[in-house]
Image: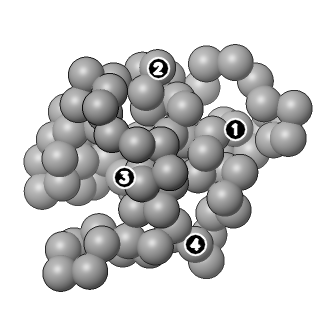
């Protein structure tokens, strides 16, 4: 995954850990699904980017998906979606 000019390498490492640990607790440690759906490139290929970003930031009513907007900015959610669509890296 390319480094983002807007996010420090330290923050990128934190986000990788966040996705692998926090998101992985519901979406599976390999992001292949669990309580939540798979977050693999194949599973996300037809999903609109804006909808994925919105789901991360606002959550999904009526599901266990919480809003993460108190912890993540829109640019960080965008970075996560970009990484998920490309194949999210392992913890660095």
Mark closest to the chain's N terminus, 1 or 4? 1
Q: Quadrant of the C terminus?
A: top right
Q: In the structure shown, which secondary structural element does the residue marked by tag 4 occupy?
A: loop
Q: Is residue 58 left or right of residue 64?
A: right
CA gap between label 4 and label 3 equals 14 Å
| Real-space CA distance between mark 2 and mark 1, rounded to the nearest whole angstrom | 15 Å
Q: Earlier in the sequence, mark 4 or mark 2?
A: 4
Which residue position holds label 4?
69
Query: Between disc 4 and disc 3, whose residue precedes?
Result: 3
Indicate which disc, 3 or 2, sits on the residue closer to the N terminus: 3
Disc 2 residue crowd, few under 14, some 14–19, many 20+, Cα 10 Å: some
Q: Give the mark nearest the N terminus, 2 or 1.
A: 1
Earlier sequence position, callout 3 versus callout 1: 1
Q: Which residue is mark 1?
A: 12
**How far is disc 1 from disc 4 in space, using C-alphas?**
17 Å
Q: Can the viewer see residue 60 in this picture?
A: yes
Say which of marks 3 and 2 sits in front.
Answer: 2
The residue pinned by badge 2 equals 86
- Could you tell me residue 8's position as x and y percent? 84, 39
Which quadrant would the N terminus be assigned to in this image? Answer: top right
Closest to the camera, between mark 4 and mark 3, is 4
Q: Is residue 6 left or right of residue 59?
A: right
Alpha carbon of mark 4 to alpha carbon of mark 2: how far? 23 Å
Would you name the residue on which mark 3 appears?
A: 23
Position of 30 relative to 18 (above/below): above
Q: Are marks 2 and 1 in contact (CB under 8 Å)?
A: no
What residue lies at 55% left-to-right and 32% top-to-bottom? 82
Mark 2 element type: helix
Q: What x and y, as percent, mark residue 77?
A: 58, 52
> How far apart are the alpha carbons under marks 3 and 2?
17 Å
Residue name at image x 24 percent, y 48 percent? 27
């Amino acid at each position: 995954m390319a480094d983002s000019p807007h996010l420090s390498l330290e923050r990128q490492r934190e986000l990788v850990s966040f996705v692998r640990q926090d998101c992985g607790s519901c979406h599976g440690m390999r992001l292949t699904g669990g309580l939540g759906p798979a977050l693999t490139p194949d599973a996300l290929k037809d999903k609109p980017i804006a909808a994925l970003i919105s789901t991360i930031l606002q959550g999904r009513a009526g599901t266990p998906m919480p809003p993460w907007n108190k912890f993540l900015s829109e640019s960080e959610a965008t970075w996560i979606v970009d990484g998920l669509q490309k194949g999210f890296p392992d913890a660095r």
